[in-house]
Image (tube, rainbow, N blue to C red):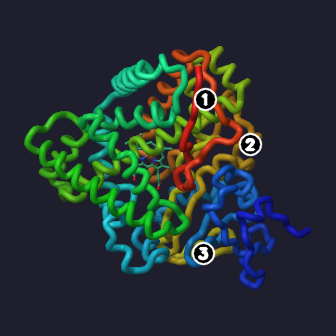
Amino acid sequence: MPHVPLYEHAVNRVSSSASTRIATGRTAAVLSIDLNSPALLRNPYPLYAELRREAPIHRLMPGIWLTTRYEDADRILRDPRFGKDFLAGVARRYGADAVEKPAFQMVNRFMLLMNPPQHTRLRGLVGKAFSVKQAPELRRLAQREADRLIDGFIDRGCADLVRTFAYPLPVRIICALLDIPPEDGLPYLEDAQALVKVFEPSPIGPSDIDAADRAAQAFERHFREVCDERRKNPGCDLISLLLQAEEGEDRLSGDEIVANVALLFLAGHETTANMIGNALLTLFRHPEQLASLRANPSLLPRAVNECLRYETSVHIAARVAMHDVAIGTVTIKRGETVYISLAAANRDPAVFEDPERFLIERPEPTPRPLSFGGGLHYCLGARLARIELETALGCLLQRLPALQLENIDAPLWKPTIAIRGLDRLQARW
Ligand code: HEM
């Protein structure tokens, strides 16, 4: 029976002569998927379902693949035959000269994009700095900042919660952990959004690359100054703890420290800010689930877990094959990139019962969503992110009992798929 794609406008099939044999024994056309299509950005899940059903892996362009099933995603994240080679992907998509661009160079120094043994060393150091802060202390910090922000807008009766709450909350928290004034972090929000575009699986245009370069240079300048100052006046913040590593046996270079402070700033807010918006939207789109949560706030951790599964903010993680690896009947050649759709894996019916349903009381034990990745690069901030999400949702629902969101049927999504989030979330109470 011929297979009819659900998203014909998002999926253009190339000639069937360029076909790939897949594990199910069917022959699937090599897909060229427009990951920037407006329909896909509005709702990528029907396409994810189609791709997941059709084959374990799809070729997006020569040397670049996309995988969507939970089992494959989970296995690739943990498979030591896959690693990171960010600049190889840059050269493939933008040409060899592009690797020298400031944005790609800075991002390439992120621990997120390193392999062992460099990754092991850096992760150990940053992880140690992170574990110094205990959960109750982080919860108090999150609660204090959430209350402060709500105090600032509660009398207005309406606000865009993306700008007034979802972004400033994690920015203030990561700034507190880095011990930089929030006023120093907030002006960098646009730069942060410009820089994270380099993670988009589809090539971005020259103006976006220029904006990412300017952002990388601004971060570089700012965090270098902060590090220089902190060397003179150390404290017990994350930057001071990282700087101590300059002196130890596992020395970090100044450039590595600056880049990874920028990573903490970026990863510490961009992912969580988008996730707060996605979680709010999802809850208000499912009023019966929201009502159960309001009636029983102890469901908050499970509600956060289900929001992370159902509408995660980080849709894609990337790996590069360090050896030739077979997936189904396709061989991923050494040096080729695999994009892992964490969001598609999170709705895989082979793993989650009734996955398209948002259900905060899923039968226990619920399989682990892949929203924080897996294996060596498992999110270092997962514990902090859960605390922030629980506090953000808990505080808003408690302090704004009449909260209502506008445009929940046609919300304004940002034009990016690697990180998915709302551009605006207008609310009244
Ligand atoms: C809802 C919020 C968050 C989500 C969905 C998220 C998701 C992820 C994912 C999927 C990865 C792995 C990427 C890969 O395997 O290539 C990752 C890594 C990472 N995340 Fe998060 N993250 C969140 C919040 C945070 C926060 C609050 C921080 C704190 C600073 C943070 C810091 C990091 C770092 C440093 C890494 C790199 C770890 C490594 O390479 O070993 N994240 N995150």
- Measured along the vertical axis of the image, is residue 333 above or below residue 83? below
Give percent across and percent down for residue 131. Answer: 32, 36
How crowded pointer 1 is (Cα within 10 Å; few <14, some 14-19, many 20+) is rated as: many
How far apart are the two marked residues, 2 and 3, measured between alpha carbons? 29 Å
Give percent across and percent down for residue 195. Answer: 40, 56
Residue type marked 3 = Met
Answer yes or no: is residue 139 visible: no
Q: Which element is circle 3 on? A: strand
How crowded pointer 3 is (Cα within 10 Å; few <14, some 14-19, many 20+) is rated as: some
Q: Residue most toward the bottom? A: 17
Query: N-terminal of the two: label 3 or label 1?
Result: 3
Name the image quarter holding the N terminus: bottom right
Q: Residue at x 49, y 64 (%)?
A: 319
Q: Residue most toward the left? A: 232
Q: Which residue is drawn at 34% across and 40% down?
A: 186
**Disc 1 beta carbon < 8 A from ligand 1?**
no
Residue 303 marker: 1
Residue type marked 2 = Glu
Q: Which element is circle 2 on? A: loop
Q: Residue at x 22, y 54 (%)?
A: 221
Dividing the picture into quadrants, the one containing residue 238 is top left
Left or right: where does residue 374 sit relative to residue 127? Answer: right
Give percent across and percent down for residue 136. Answer: 37, 22
Query: N-terminal of the two: label 2 or label 1?
Result: 1
Q: Could you say which is closer to the camera, residue 304 or residue 122?
A: 304
Residue type marked 1 = Ala
Name the image quarter holding the C terminus: top right
Residue beneath label 3, please?
61
Residue 356 marker: 2
Answer yes or no: is residue 356 visible: yes
Q: Could you say which is closer to the camera, residue 300 or residue 207?
A: 207
